[in-house]
Amino acid sequence: MLVTLKQILGKAHRGHYAVGAFNVNNLEMIQAVMLAAEAEKSPAIMSTSEGAIHYAGMEELGALAHLAAKRSKLPITFHLDHGKNVELIKTAIKSGLYGSVMFDGSSLPYEENVATTKELVILAHKTNVSVEAELGAIAGIEDFVTVADRDAHLTDPKQAVDFVKRTGCDALAIAVGTKHGAYKFAGDSTLDYARIKKIASVVKIPLVLHGASGVPENVKKVCIQYGCDIEDAKGVSDASIRKSVSLGINKVNIDTDLRIAFDAGVRKFLHDNPKVIDPREILKPAVELIAKVVAQKMRLLGSSGKS
Ligand code: G3H
Ligand code: 13P
Ligand code: ZN
């Protein structure tokens, strides 16, 4: 069943759990997310980045996701992730395919971020599309040399209050020390928990954690065993995610972990089955592995059984 982001996150906000937003780029990723959601009886958010749209097409991905969601009784949102191109976001809103869009104006001057977010919120809300906005620079905590540097880049709670009030956005992505990709930390995985707690106490809409992949050891091991060079990859620990959710995060974005699982599944299968040339056979174990990873995230976030 297709629903808006606001519906899914409103329930998560009231119930103090989080829902995973999983990036999908093709049929197999969509199949894997749905397999996991059905197994866990969990709501799910299927995200398409601008890159995914460039790769596979907005209408193509939308059609696949809509079919899958409409056949299911679970609440599913089809979401535009990190929209930076305002024209593309407007196209997404008008397409009727998206339950939500994200406008990522985090690199813009503050007033410009406010103005564009507000303009998109007004447009999106006319057709019941939810809007996620972003404030602060999503960068690893180890990237900041001083406390002042960290304060200047991570989301400022006071500014977050002003931003939400002035834009009317439905969810807010905050910067608390995670970054995108497979290389997040050299040392321990630690986030600015005090900042999450403070923002959650003053901002009354659902908060979003980006760059939340964990780079699970068991999947990374298979990847490396079959030739992938990701020895130094390190993600956000499960404990850090659990703590972030307990402090007020309601949407957790995961892309890298699905990529690693896809990679591990394909590499292992091709190594073990050198005579197989049928893509359907080659991709099947990858779908199953991605589904396992997604299901584990649903349990970690507390969305299992919350459909
Ligand atoms: O946050 C970004 C996602 O990981 C999407 O990555 O732009 O390569 O599709 P992408
Ligand atoms: P990861 O790279 O940690 O999976 O983050 C994905 C993300 O934030 C998508 O918006
Ligand atoms: Zn992101």
Image (tube, helix red, strand yellow):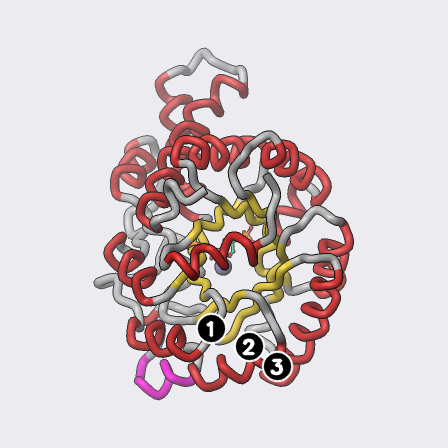
Q: Is residue 228 left or right of residue 92?
A: left
Magenta residue check for 147: yes
Residue 164 numbered tag: 2
Q: Are marks 1 and 3 in contact (CB under 8 Å)?
A: no
- Mark 2 residue element: helix
Q: Which image quarter is the C terminus in?
A: top left
Check disc 3: other Cα within 10 Å, few if <14, some if 14-19, many if 20+. few
Q: Which residues are magenta?
A: 145-152
**What distance separates the C-alpha of mark 3 from that of mark 2?**
6 Å
N-term-proximal mark, 2 vs 1 = 2
Amino acid carrying mark 3 in the image: Arg
Q: Is residue 193 above or below residue 82?
A: below
- Above or below, comparing residue 307 to residue 113 in the picture: above
Q: Residue 186's image quarter?
A: bottom left
Q: Nearer the viewer, residue 41 or 254?
A: 41
Asked if residue 13 lies left or right of residue 8, the reply is: left
Q: CA distance from mark 2 to mark 1?
A: 9 Å
Crowding near the residue tagged with mark 1, few <14, some 14–19, many ≥20 C-alpha atoms within 10 Å: some
Q: Nearer the viewer, residue 278 or 209?
A: 209
Judge by depth and name the residue closer to the eye, 295 or 82.
295
Q: Secondary structure at mark 1?
A: loop
User: Where in the figure is residue 68, as x and y percent of width and height?
Assistant: 59, 32
Q: Looking at the image, is mark 2 or mark 1 nearer the viewer?
A: 1
User: Which quadrant holds residue 82?
Assistant: bottom right
The N terminus sits in image quarter:
top right
